Image: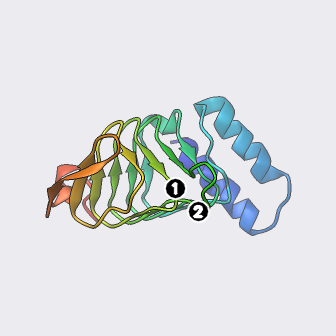
Amino acid sequence: MLNAVAIYRLANLLYRYRIPVAPKLLKLLIFLIYNSSIPYECTIGKKSFLGYGGIGVVIHKSAVIGENVIIGPNVTIGGRSNMAGAPVIGNNVYIGTGAKVLGAVKICDRVLIGANAVVIADVPSDCVVAGVPARIIKKDVDITKLCNLENE
């Protein structure tokens, strides 16, 4: 199925092979079809998935997204004004609709980020965060079953 991640993967492959114009055209295609900004320079791990094809998703070009991550629509993974760095997201993470992950933050493995949460601080493994700004609301949670993040 053609979605924003599939187009991103092709653009990223062409970028890594130093083909000059094609990645930029594919990034523009993602923007036109899905109203999303998914730069070919960022890193998105295997089995990561953008809900609803990736509608409204914005990702920083230096962001690193791990494997088996589910990203809801209208999510922003980006920088903060006048601060260097971009988010690093671990494996088996669920990012709810409308959430914002901003700045040089590290989201560890097996984390659930609630809808419309604003994450501006590091998040440890095995927890649920929600709110503005996001706070840990539950610890020692097995989100792999809760969010269908089972490894195959």
Q: Residue shown at 73%/39% (left/top)? A: 28
Image quarter in which the C terminus is found: bottom left
The first of marks 2 and 1 along the sequence is 2
Q: Residue type at mark 2?
A: Gly
Where is residue 91 shown, x and y percent of the image? 37, 65
* Residue 152 visible in the picture: no
Q: Residue 94 bears which disc, if any?
A: none
Q: Nearer the viewer, residue 137 or 94?
A: 137
The disc at residue 85 is: 2
Secondary element at image label 1: loop
Choose between 69 and 81: the one closer to the eye. 81
Residue closest to the far front:
82
Question: What is the crowding at mark 1: few (fewer than 14 residues within 10 Å), some, or many (at least 20)?
Answer: many
Q: Position of residue 17 (x, y in %)?
A: 77, 68
Number of marks in the rendered image: 2
| Label 2 environment density (alpha carbons within 10 Å; few <14, some 14–19, many ≥20) | some
Please name the amino acid that badge 1 sits on. Answer: Gly
Q: Quadrant of residue 108?
A: bottom left
Q: Does residue 84 appear in the picture of this structure?
A: yes
Check contact, mark 2 vs mark 1: CB within 8 A.
yes
- Residue 73: image quadrant is top left
- At horizontal 41% and vertical 40% (from top left) the residue drawn is 51
Q: Nearer the viewer, residue 29 or 134?
A: 134
Left or right: where 23 falls relative to 98: right
Any mark on residue 103, and which? Answer: 1
Instruction: Give SS at disc 2.
Output: loop
